[in-house]
Amino acid sequence: MCRMLLTIGKYSDLTQYLDFLYEMANEGKHAPHHDGFGYVLYAKNEMFVEKSIDPIKKIDGLYANTLIAHARKKSSSGKSIINTQPFLSDNISFAHNGTIKGLGKKGKSDSYNYFRLVLKGLPEAITRIREMEFTSINFIMTDGSYAAAYREVRKEPGYFTLFYKTDEDRFTISTEVMNGKWYEIEDRTLVIYRNGRVKEYKADDVVPGVI
């Protein structure tokens, strides 16, 4: 269980977005989410990663093009840096909100192993996990040049939400809404933002391999 956020666009100060994650973690749905936090910044072909097992804190001066951030509320595996999100593989960052029973193994969380499956192929990952018991397999993902979000929920749909909004020079995905006009991502829907355009893909039966 967690709160998470992803924003991509023009190089600017993104402090307000981490501040909003702080608010969600402390005052949002099912708060508090105090079992670690992390974020990745993408700025001018560089990446900066910060992770902690401590509760999320406010940080000023986060200048970047892209920010992906996550505040954790553990459901099974203990607090550790290895299980603190976002997870990374090369330049790809990933965050998950939910619990997938039977996927956590050898000290690695279910979310970590979910990411490893997604890296091998999104359609195959979703098809396999649909055979398991889970609350939500919602995720957000980016390599700094695109943003992707997937929502599929079996329990507590009012908590396991994802929303997105588009501004003139920015696209944002969040588990809860801040200011502006937001659109809720429907169940079994993949949303991708790339080159200034937003596309939605339904995944009722077959998950599109578009990432």
Image (cartoon, rainbow, N blue to C red):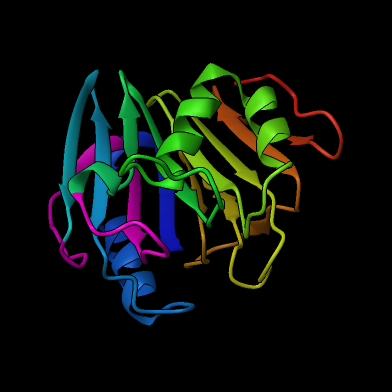
Residue at the image point whose x is 66% and y is 39% from the top: 129
Q: Is any atom of residue 168 visible in this view?
A: no
Q: Which residue is depicted at the point 19% across and 47% down?
A: 81
Q: Vertically, is 17 above or below 172?
A: below
Image quarter (top left, top right, bottom left or bottom right) of the C terminus: top right
Q: Is residue 119 left or right of residue 10?
A: right
Q: Magenta span has 200? A: no
Q: Nearer the viewer, residue 20 or 84?
A: 84
Q: Quick check: can you spot residue 9?
A: yes
Q: Is-magenta flag for residue 68?
A: yes
Residue 21 image offset from top left, x and y in percent = 34, 63
Up-down: is 175 above or below 187?
below
Counting from the top left corner in percent of width and height, residue 95 is at: 42, 44
Magenta region's main secondary structure?
loop
Q: Looking at the image, which is closer to me, 176 or 134?
A: 134
Q: Which residues are magenta?
A: 54-80
List x then y, in percent, for residue 88. 32, 30
The residue drawn where x is 62% and y is 60% is 135
Residue farthest right in this picture: 205
Q: Locate residue 180, reporting x and y percent.
A: 54, 63
- Look at the picture and state if 81 lies above or below 60: above
